[in-house]
Image (cartoon, rainbow, N blue to C red):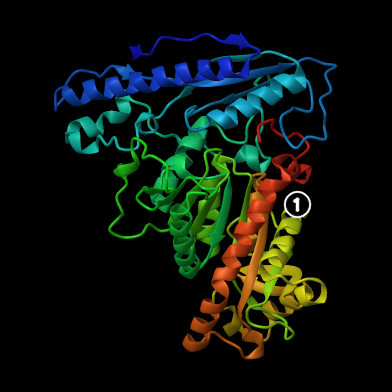
Amino acid sequence: MLAHPPFTPPAAFTDPSAALAQARQIYDAACAHLRAALAAYIAGPAEPDAAPERVRACYPFVRLRVPHGRHPDSRLAYGFVQRAGHYETTLTRPDLYADYYLEQLRLLIDNHGVTLEVGTSHQPIPLPFALAEDEHFEGALSMAQRQRLAEVFDLPDLTAMDDRIANGTHQVPPGAPEPLALFTAPRVDYSLHRLRHYTGTSPEHFQNFVLFTNYQFYIDEFIALGEREMARPDSGYDSFVQPGNVLTRRAGLPPQPGDARGVAPPRLPQMPAYHLTRSDRGGISFVNIGVGPANAKTITDHIAVLRPHAWIMVGHCAGLRGSQQLGDYVLAHGYVREDHVLDEDLPLWIPVPALAEVQIALQEAVADVTQLQGAELKRVLRTGTVATTDNRNWELLGAGSPQRRFSQSRAIALDMESATIAANGFRFRVPYGTLLCVSDKPLHGEIKLPGMANHFYRERVAQHLLIGIRAIERLRENGLHRLHSRKLRSFQEVAFQ
């Protein structure tokens, strides 16, 4: 016996708002069904002896059927499919993704002139993904109930949440629909849960522009900036959110339900996130990913499901050229990938190009903040290749292969995160950029020493952070239609951004 919520058959829509409302009704009913069944299971016998009734609820789906002879505007970066056919994707969290889904559905209807179908899919919702953030059930279960949980409910299935669509390795079985989105609903839910764990903040607070750094000094400066912004009644940001969902609203704004629920954690999470929020989600999320490509891949794997408009790395690097000075900036226009964490997902023979829209915004932001132009700007800002390595002590390998490779690649700087972040941006179709600051020159005898480093940090961190923020402001001002690039589209690209 299988207990389902009421089945909702596919219905046709030409209004994206009505289509989204249908998806939300299906999703909310499914989650309510699972929660009620869980409550009944917990209240049942601690030592169940009868065969338990199986409980299942499924995600909503959206379907697009494109007839032959329709040719959308292929100059777009997303919002259309390139050939006639049958396309589907499952949807989750229509509350969190409301604006995003509305835009995607509107573009499909406008660009193809067809109706969309929304109904109940055959993809089960894993029980943990149906619960609210503050709902925890494990402690209420007996050992026997816990052991039989998988007999009653669907639990996360890793075979339903891989990255083959994004990687371009997805094989569509004969007669099956083509994908509409890079991520299935279970894959999205998995990452939403991981984001809470790694960053200490809820996905609801993440903004559409993301900065990454590899040093806490930048975060300290961002916290001070966030507090200053919240003290300004005329700030362009509505709230400042810190780990534990500790929320401060801008001066003059009334408190909202839930504002006081945040609690600072006893210790910071692995990659703490901080958010300057706007009502249109056009604010800034800032994540300290720490040092190393593994963290860089992990966090971008999960933030990618939020479909941000851009992410940018602002951190420290080793300058590789004798002409560079400590404190100089490096704008990456190419990457040497020796991080090794993405080799299976994005082979090394795939180039990771610079994106002109982000490059121009970063260069203009340096000019805005430093007030330098022409030759004076070039004196402190150099554009070139950035090498990323997973070996923190690459200098100790001697004057052999690493240095030779870096020289042959024309690299001007080296770090442990930037190429990973850029490569995952390319892989997940998220516009990306890198602006680093030279903090040492190990090939030229200028290594990090405590006194030198502390002076450097005081001098440069605040300015570097302001440049990153100014670059995001320029991207926002220039318009999103200019930011998203066709460079990131594959031969048979999905329609959703």
Q: Residue at x 33, y 12 (%)?
A: 1
Q: Along the line of sight, which residue is nearer the eye, 51 or 391?
A: 391
Residue 343 in the image: x percent, y percent? 63, 56
Determine the residue positioned at 48% across, 70% down.
217
Residue 420 appears in view:
no
Q: Where residue 262 appears, x then y in whole percent?
A: 32, 46
**Looking at the image, which residue is at 51% across and 36% down?**
187
In-front residue for pair 259/212: 259
Q: Where is residue 254 drawn, in percent x and y? A: 38, 39
Q: Is residue 149 visible?
A: yes
Label 1: how many Cα within 10 Å (few below 14, some 14–19, many 20+):
some
Q: Secondary structure at mark 1?
A: helix
Q: Is residue 459 above or below residue 9?
A: below
Q: Residue at x 76, y 19 (%)?
A: 112
State the quadrant of the C terminus: top right
**Residue 206 in the image, given as x and y percentages of width and height:** 49, 45
Residue 283 placement, left or right of 174: left
The image quarter containing residue 157 is top left
Q: Amino acid at mark 1?
A: Glu
Residue under label 1, please give it: 357
